[in-house]
């Protein structure tokens, strides 16, 4: 139980840690209680502002400038694009697996070049979604931003040559850094982080299995297609968090002034 | 659902039970948990309990008192009592209406 309390943010532990431990000492909580505590810890990371007055709620609707409003509208549209990217990502392996079987000196392989435009478009849409996330998160959060930028650059580059797995490893590392950083900042829900990290792990596991089990090139293409399709939740998570932005649902009051950089207003 | 409680999302229902539990005096976490279980017949997990307590404290529906032996009692505030009263009166009106209609239908 006390180990599970450590899953809470520090401010929560400082405020409620002793009480939670006293609660556990009074009565064993069982599996259901432990699951509820983990769920509570995820919620606490999403809402650090509840116990830490220095943190502003990510979901609180506050007056926003006209410029910020327009920026968030763009972010929301990029989220829609990311959903389209998820569809393209699922089409790409289908196209690749329907490519012609070609024979060369090393045997047969499937020519999946027809899938490259779909992969490229899907990666571009993911980069767009990550750009939307950068707009949404705003300034600061250096690790989060660095991770997103790494993925924005390396993802589309990888689409040009899917055999360049180093580029994909960098893109994945960037995605994980972005997701965990945004989660720690309270800007991304725990479920979205799981939807980003888990497919990445599954993708790497499938690719590693393919490499280590020395499958032939035709079977390797099948595994590669499966590994690509497994990534779709990443696109959906990035897109969904942009589409659910609370502060772009309604037009802000027109009287809200825009404060431009360099102005003294 | 009362606006102040509706804003609490999935914590709205546990919060209502917690407010009802605190209506007869301050209680600490464990006492709230067992009381809510007795009222609702459903177990209240520690994560849900403290998620709801944090939200209610933030909104001024309850306040924390000085801890006693690592246990911090919570007390319902005036705003919390008003919120609970409005919610219960709304539910009572709804209950009366529903029962009246059922009686009317069975005649």
Image (spheres, coloured by chain):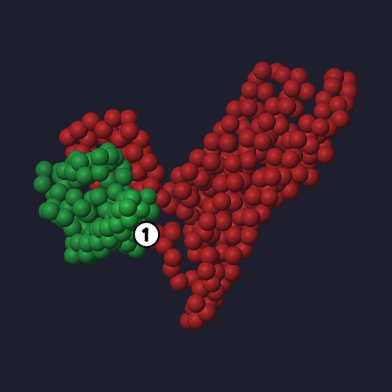
Chain colours: A red, B green
Residue A5 location (% of width, % of height): 30, 39
Left or right? Give the position of B48 relative to A230: left
Residue A202 location (% of width, % of height): 58, 31
Determine which quarter of the picture holds residue B96.
bottom left
Residue A95 location (% of width, % of height): 79, 37
Left or right? Give the position of B90 relative to A246: left
| Residue identifier under label 1 | B7
Tell me the SS state at disc 1. Answer: loop
Image point (55%, 74%), residue name = A66
Residue toward you, A41 or B61: B61
Determine which quarter of the picture holds residue A109.
top right
Q: Write down the chain letter for disc 1.
A: B
Image point (19%, 50%), residue name = B21
- Which residue is outermost to the front? B107
Q: Answer few, some or many: residues within 10 Å of disc 1's Cα (few below 14, many 20 plus, some between 14 and 19).
A: few
Is residue B52 in view?
Answer: no
Image point (70%, 18%), residue name = A214
Left or right? Give the position of A146 relative to A222: left
Whether A94 is drawn above or below A192: the answer is above
Image point (72%, 45%), residue name = A88
Left or right? Give the position of A10 relative to A63: left
């Amino acid at each position: 139980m006390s180990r599970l309390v450590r899953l809470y943010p520090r401010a929560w532990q400082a405020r409620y840690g002793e009480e939670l431990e006293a609660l556990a000492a009074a009565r064993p909580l069982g599996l259901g209680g432990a699951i509820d505590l983990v769920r509570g810890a995820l919620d606490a990371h999403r809402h650090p502002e509840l116990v830490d007055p220095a943190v502003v709620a990510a979901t609180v609707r506050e007056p926003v400038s006209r410029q910020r409003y327009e920026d968030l509208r763009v972010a929301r549209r990029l989220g829609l694009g990311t959903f389209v990217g998820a569809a393209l990502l699922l089409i790409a392996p289908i196209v690749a697996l329907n490519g012609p079987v070609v024979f060369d000196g090393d045997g047969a392989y499937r020519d999946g070049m027809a899938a490259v435009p779909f992969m490229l478009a899907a990666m571009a849409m993911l980069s767009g979604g990550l750009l939307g996330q950068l707009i949404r998160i705003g300034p600061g959060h250096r690790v989060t931003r660095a991770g997103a930028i790494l993925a924005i650059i390396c993802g589309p580059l990888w689409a040009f040559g899917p055999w360049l797995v180093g580029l994909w490893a960098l893109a994945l590392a960037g995605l994980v850094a972005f997701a965990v950083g945004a989660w720690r900042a309270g800007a991304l829900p725990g479920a979205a982080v799981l939807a980003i990290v888990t497919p990445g792990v599954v993708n790497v596991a499938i690719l590693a299995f393919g490499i280590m089990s020395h499958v032939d090139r035709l079977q390797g293409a099948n595994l590669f297609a499966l590994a690509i399709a497994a990534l779709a939740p990443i696109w959906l998570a990035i897109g969904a968090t942009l589409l659910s932005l609370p502060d772009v649902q309604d037009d802000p009051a027109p009287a809200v002034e825009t404060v431009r950089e360099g102005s003294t207003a | 659902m009362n606006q102040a409680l509706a804003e609490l999302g999935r914590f709205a229902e546990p919060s209502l039970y917690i407010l009802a539990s605190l209506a007869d005096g301050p209680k600490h976490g464990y006492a709230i948990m067992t009381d809510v279980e007795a009222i609702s017949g459903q177990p209240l997990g520690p994560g849900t309990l403290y998620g709801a307590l944090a939200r209610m404290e933030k909104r001024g529906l309850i306040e924390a008192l000085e801890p006693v032996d690592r246990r911090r009692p919570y007390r319902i505030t005036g705003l919390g009592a008003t919120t609970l009263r409005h919610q219960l009166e709304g539910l009572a009106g709804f209950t009366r209406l529903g029962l009246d209609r059922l009686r009317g239908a069975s005649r």
